[in-house]
Image (tube, grey):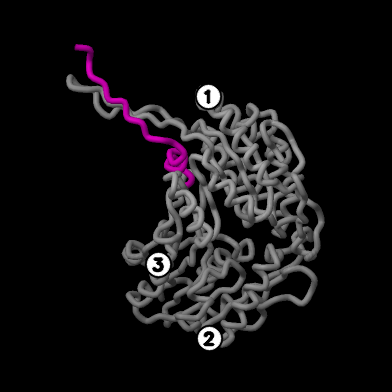
Amino acid sequence: MLIDGQLVPGASTMPVINPAKGVPFAHSPAASLAQVDEAVAAARRAFPAWSRTPFEARRAAVTAIADAIELHKDELADVLTLEHGKPRAQALVEVQGTVDYFRFFTTLSLTPELLEDSDMRRVEIHRVPLGVIAAIVPWNFPLLLLAFKLPAALLAGNTVVVKPAPTTPLTTLAVARLTAGLVPAGVVNVIAGTDEIGPALTAHPDVRKVSFTGSTETGKKVMAGSAARLQRVTLELGGNDPAIVLGDVDVRKTATLVFASAFGTCGQVCRAVKRVYVHASVYEAFCDALAALAQRAVVGDGAEQAVDYGPVQNAAQFERLKGLLDDARQHGEVMPGGGPVDRPGYFFRPTIVKDCEPQSRLVVEEQFGPILPVMPFDDVDEALRQANSGPYGLAASVWSADMDLAHSVASRLDTGTVWINKHIDRTPHVPVAGAKQSGVGVELGLYGLLDFTQLKVINASCPA
């Protein structure tokens, strides 16, 4: 782990399981609660000097981290495949995406804004750093989602304590090793650990902001723990993201795009397609096209060649998916070819479930895995009512050849992002913000950088 500029062992260790085998392949350091305090204290000591460091010097440090990650991208991709399970080519895409996101943030600036300059007053808007940031990263994209947080926090002048998920700590710890020496001691600290470490970090009295990506239920706990100190939070949480497919689409083309958006990374993506509403005029053909794609999918160990989909990342999620599938069999039609694979590891084939009842678990809950419910509709108002139901509002998509109609439908979806004729079009300059219980605050783009700052107004009059 990285604490106060030093690479240190944990107070204990924890096994890291290869989900393609279902057995440990390595052990990670695990921090004690005392080491949480040490990491926060180091970040607090480093903050005054780092916050006064010129922006250009902070930009150079973030660029150096990006350079180091890019230089070691092959070995990082190897570790990511082992601990996450995603195919090696996809792991390499994630590592390169991490580099690209770091580099994007270095193109931004925090130039003060002149709000008024008159005989009465001169008003400037400044953006100043907050202090110690706790960055909590989930297991589905342990490097890319780090790049949503770390470069922006550092450029804004904050110091950071990063905690990766306990099932995928190794790539983040590898980045910690690369970062050591590229920034002053204490500016970046990376600790790993079990479930007790997260609450201790997010509730720490010296943490000024928590940037958390994960489930809605855990996000509620983070917000509750922050309430006593009015601690800042950015929460990128769960999503049960609908796709509405209108009757004028090219069925084969649209089904291919929807399938890729639903099953990439085995569906373990916050903003993946999670449920599909298809106009009745093309419904049967659309379900058949999805099922054909599912049957052709190549599922296997991500370290092997020509694998489309690796295993589900962990045993708990694998068991939950099996429970969702059992429920779906009672409330819909499971199309042939899907379900768990009878082999070691946590393999689950892409699975299409048609005619799901609206209140079935697979429709109401976020599955976060390779099972996709598909439902027909006759009236677009009814499709919108169902798509907007539930507590989530992360993202959605509309698919149609009629762009005016598509925009009209998109405007009525209650989500932070709506795509038209695509899904999961993610780039670093486009902000991410969830509606309803899918999040608080903003990540990415200039808005994401500003979310790591305090707005400070300097309002001056000319001397008397």
Locate residue 451, reporting x and y percent.
44, 41
State which mark lies toward you, 1 or 3.
1
x 51%, y 31%: residue: 157
Give the image location of residue 392, x and y in percent. 44, 65
> Residue placed at 35% from the left, 75% from the top?
380
Q: In front here: 180 or 81?
A: 180
Q: Identify whether 410 is placed above or below 180.
A: below
Tell me the residue at 68%/54% (across/down).
194
Q: Amino acid at mark 1?
A: Glu
Kindly identify which numbered label has been placed on residue 56.
1
Point out the tag, 2 or 1, that comes first from the N-terminus.
1
> For mark 2, what is the residue?
331
Q: Mark 2 falls on what kind of element?
A: helix
Closest to the observer, 395 or 36: 36
**Which stretch is magenta?**
443-464
Mark 2 vs mark 3, foreground winner is: 2
Residue 51 covered by magenta stretch:
no
Q: Amino acid at mark 2?
A: His
Q: Identity of the amino acid at label 3?
A: Ala
With 101 as the anchor, is 378 left or right in this view? left
Q: CA distance from mark 2 to mark 3?
A: 32 Å
Point out which mark residue 401 bears: 3
Secondary structure beneath label 3: loop
- Please tell me how crowded label 3 is: few (under 14), some (14-19), or many (20+) other residues with Cα within 10 Å: some
Earlier residue among tags 1 and 3 = 1
Q: Are marks 2 and 3 in contact (CB under 8 Å)?
A: no
Task: Note whether residue 434 is visible.
Answer: yes
- Local SS, label 1: helix
Q: Quadrant of residue 436?
A: bottom left
